[in-house]
Image (cartoon, helix red, strand yellow):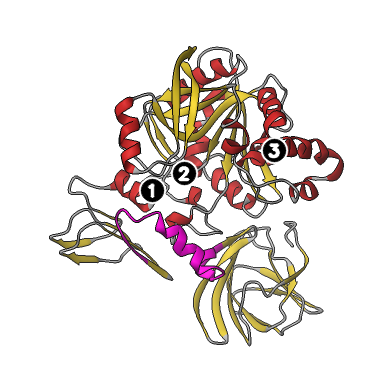
Amino acid sequence: MGGELKINTVILAGGMGKRLWPLSRRTWPKYMLRPGMDKSLLQAAWDRVAPFGGSRRVVTSAESGFLVSREIRKKDPGFGEENLILEPLSRNTAPAVMLGIADMEDDDIVAVLPADQVVEGDFSETILKAAVVASQGYIVTIGITPDRPATGYGYIKSSQEKIGEGFLVEEFKEKPDEDTARGYLESGGYFWNAGLFVFRAGTMRREMERHAPEISRGFERISREGARSVYRELPGISIDYAVMEKTDRVAVVPFAGRWDDLGSWESIHRILAAEDGNFSSGETCLEDVSGCFFQVPSGKLVGAAGVRDLIAVDTPDALLLLKKGEGQKVKDLVERLGDDPRAARHLTDYRPWGGYRVLEEGDGYKVKVLFVSPRERLSLQRHKFRDEVWTVIKGKGLITSGEEKKETVSGETVRIPAGALHRAENTGSGELEILELASGEKISEDDIERVEDDYGRR
C-alpha cells in the first residue's frame, strides 16, 4: 500500500451466526465457514488486512480464542498471543471495539471489521480513503453501494457535504421493509451499513465518553479491577447504538465492490448459485428443479424433482428445510432449540487440546473418539454421573485415573469410574486417539468438574 499512513486493524470475531444453523453453531461460529472458498471467512479477513502496515489483532471470546488461533495459524504461522485479545464475557461490539483499541495511542488510525464477511474489489483503496478522512477527526463508516432493495441491512443516508473522498452522514436507518428499501435505491445517496469503521483511537474514546459514558468509565477501571469484574457491569450494546447513531463526527466512504455479510442461507445461495439458480455441494440428480440450494455431507447424492426455491442443509445430526425468502426465521428456530446440544456443537467438536467426534449415543451411553494434539492434555477432571472406558486406538499417551498414572499405547484400556479424577496427555509426536465409552444415568458435556486446566477454563 502506497504512502506512509499505517492503519492498525481490529477484527471482531464474535457471534454464532444463528441464521446459518446447522452449519454454524455456538462452538463453530459463522466465521469458521468456507462458503465456496478455499479458506474460512476468518482466514480471508486476516489476509484482507495484511496490506495496511499497522498492527493486526482479533478480538474474540475467551471460549473461542483457541479456535481463532488455530484457524489463522493454518495460513499464517506467525500469528501469536499479541494478535489475540480475549473478551472475558460477550457484551456486543461497543465494548469489543474499546478492548481492541485499549492500548493504542490517540493518534493511531484503526480499521475495525467483522470476521464473517465476503469482500471483493478495491477494499484496500477504500480503507485508505477512509483513513485520510479519519485523520481529520471523523469516525468513518464504509457504506456498501446497494444493488438490490435488501431488507436485512441497516442503511446510511449520506448528505451532500463532501469530506475528502467521503460524505458527512445525515442519518442511520433501521432495516426497512421492501418498499422502503426500493425507495432508498431510487432516490440515491443510501448505502448499506456494513459494520466497517475507520477512526483515530482518540476520536473513538472521546465519542464513547460523550455518548456511552458507562462504557468509557468501565474501561478506565479495568487496569485497577480487572477485565472480568468490569465486563460483568458493562451494557451489551453495539457500536452503532452506542456511538455511530449519536455522534456528529461521522462520515461515510462508499465501497462499490462485492460485499456480503452472509446473514442468511439466501445470501450464501446468491453467491454460489449456478446459472440455472441451483447449487449443490455434492452430486445431484435433478428433474424440473429451480432456485434450490442443497448443502449436504461429502459423498451424499441429492435427488430432487419438481421443487422450487427450497434450501436444504444436511449435517450428520441435523437437517434444515427452508423455503427461500424465510431465512430470517432460522434464528427463531435456533432459539426454540434452547439448550439442545445440536444448537451448540457438531458431532465433531474442538477443544484447546484437540477435540472429539461422537460416533453413537443412546439412553445411558455415548461412544466417541477423543483426538489429542501433540504436547497437549485434557484438564484434570471428574464426572459425577458417568463411568468411562478409554481405549487407546492410535498414538502414545499418559493416562491418569484416580491415583494411577499409566503410559499407554495402541490397544490398551483404562477404566475410569464416576467421581475419579482423570486426564489424558499426548506424549508422542503424532495425534493421540482414544475410543471413549461413557455409561451412566446422565451423559452430558456439562457433567464435568475441572480441578486443573492448562487453558484457564472453569
Residue 412 as seen in the image, left or right of residue 49: right
> Is 453 placed above or below 118 here?
below
148 lies left or right of 155? left
Please give the name of the residue rendered at 43% of the width and 41% of the height, measured from the top-left corner.
175
Amino acid type indicated by mark 1? Pro
Q: Which of 333 and 82 is in front in this view?
A: 333
Task: From the top left corner, tell me how far across and down residue 332 is, in percent.
Answer: 46, 61
Q: Residue at x 45, y 38 (%)?
A: 154
State the residue at coordinates (32%, 30%). Answer: 185
Q: Nearer the viewer, residue 354 or 30?
A: 30
Is residue 231 located in the magenta-colored stretch of the structure?
A: no
> Would you say the residues marked 2 and 1 are in contact, meaning their CB atoms lie under 8 Å apart?
yes
Q: Judge depth for marks 3 and 2 and give the one in front.
A: 3
Dot placed on the residue nearer the N-terminal end, 2 or 1:
1
Q: Which residue is drawn at 48% across and 51% down?
A: 30
Mark 3 residue type: Leu
Image-quadrant location for residue 119: top left
Residue at the spot of label 3 = 99
Q: Type of residue at label 2?
A: Leu
Look at the image and say whether residue 340 sits in the magenta stretch.
Answer: yes
Q: Of label 3 and label 2, which has the lower sequence position?
A: 2
* Contact? badges 3 and 1 (CB < 8 Å): no
The alpha-carbon separation of the residues under discs 3 and 1 comes to 30 Å
| Magenta segment boundaries in residue numbering | 320-349
Q: In this view, does 215 lie to the left or right of 174?
A: right
Q: Residues within 10 Å of mark 2 (few under 14, many from 20)?
A: many
Q: Say what secondary structure mark 2 lies in.
A: helix
Q: What element carries label 1?
A: loop
